[in-house]
Image (spheres, grey):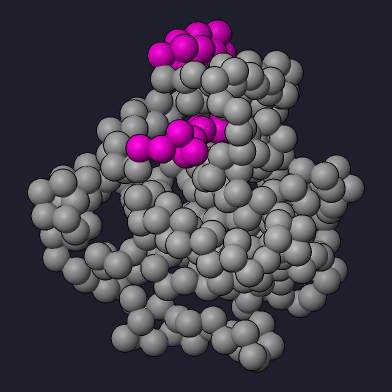
Amino acid sequence: MVLFLVVDGDMRMSSPNDPDPLLFLTVLIVSAPANAQVRSTIRATWLRLSPSSPKLRHFFLVGKRGLSKDILRSLDEEADREEDLLFLHGLEDSFQNLTFKVSQGISLLSKNFPSLYLLKCDDDSFVRLDKIFAELETREREVSGKLSSEKRACWYWGYFDGRAPIQEKGKWKEKNAYLLCDNYLPYALGGGYVISKQCTDFIRNNRHILKPYMNEDVTIGTWLSAISTQRHHDTRFDTEWNSRGCSNRYLIQHKVSQVEMMEKYRNLKAKGRLCTEEWRRRGGYEYNWETPPSQCCHRNSSII
């Protein structure tokens, strides 16, 4: 059994029964303090379908600073019961602090639960963790036969955008001016993406000197542009601002309600597929890495 404590925003770990502390995959689920029911639904649906492996761990990331006594008591009871909450004691859980929340969560897991891969998602995402785990195992076998760990680049897997204009108003307004380009640098949309250990180690070792931006997805994409990074755009990540529809091929879907999570779970258990019926709100796009980012992403109605 792995024992851990979270103290003043840091985490200490001991795993006396595991001679190899390196995990294969950690899942970081960004969650609001009051979303206890959402977390329960995730545990009862897509986490229940996760592969049974000691090399897989998940954590719900929650900021604790400034919360009421009732919410703190509820969170502590949930943590004792479920053993899957990662608390940031020094961070107020707010939209304005989302970039700090995610980067600090990635850093803590990189330090205390090092793993070959980390999957970050939101608590309104539905994840085919079994399929992602299997595909990462296949990739790892292929990569480990070719490259040593010292020669690997950061690997960044998700659904990328390179056309997004700099936000000058609204809740996404950049208070620290984004001066690198007239668009944000290519980044994977934050409903769900996977990064390798080379990426998480870089974030942990350098986040204190890297410039944060208002959008946490933009921040991670911009930071990882500073190092040798292999980006893998995958249309099976349905992680835009709202869902493109329902496809049985999807690995991650964003903006999924609790009712929809339960429906997808029941479909998978009974029929082995996500969707009662596949449907499409709009087409996706393949990212064209041979063109400037502003021309990267042309939708095609035939793409899921």
Look at the image and give the residue range highlighted in magenta: 52-81
Q: Position of residue 114 (x, y in %)?
A: 65, 39
User: Which image quarter: residue 157?
Assistant: bottom right
x and y percentages locating residue 87 in the rendered image = 60, 24
Residue 224 x/y as whole percent: 74, 62
Point out the residue furthest to the left here: 270
How many numbered marks are there? Answer: 0
Q: Residue at position x 78%, y 51% from top?
A: 202
Foreground pick, 168 / 110:
110
Query: With respect to residue 41, does 169 lie above or below?
Result: below
Residue 82 higher or lower than 204, as above or below: above
Question: In the displayed image of the protein, which residue is found farthest to the bottom?
Answer: 291
Q: Picture coordinates of residue 246 (x, y %)? A: 26, 65
Q: Is residue 209 left or right of residue 60?
A: right
The one of 165 and 130 positioned closer to us in this rendering: 130
Q: Quadrant of the C terminus?
A: bottom left
* Residue 188 in view here: no
Does residue 63 show up magenta in the picture? yes
**Residue occupying the point 49% across, 87% down:** 298
Q: Residue at x 44, y 41 (%)?
A: 123
Residue 79 lies in the magenta-colored region: yes
With 149 as the anchor, is 284 left or right in this view? left
Q: Nearer the viewer, residue 86 or 111?
A: 111
Residue sitting at x 58%, y 50%? 117
Say whether residue 53 is visible. yes
Nearer to us in this view, 238 or 112: 112
Placement of 275 over or under 87, stated as above or below = below
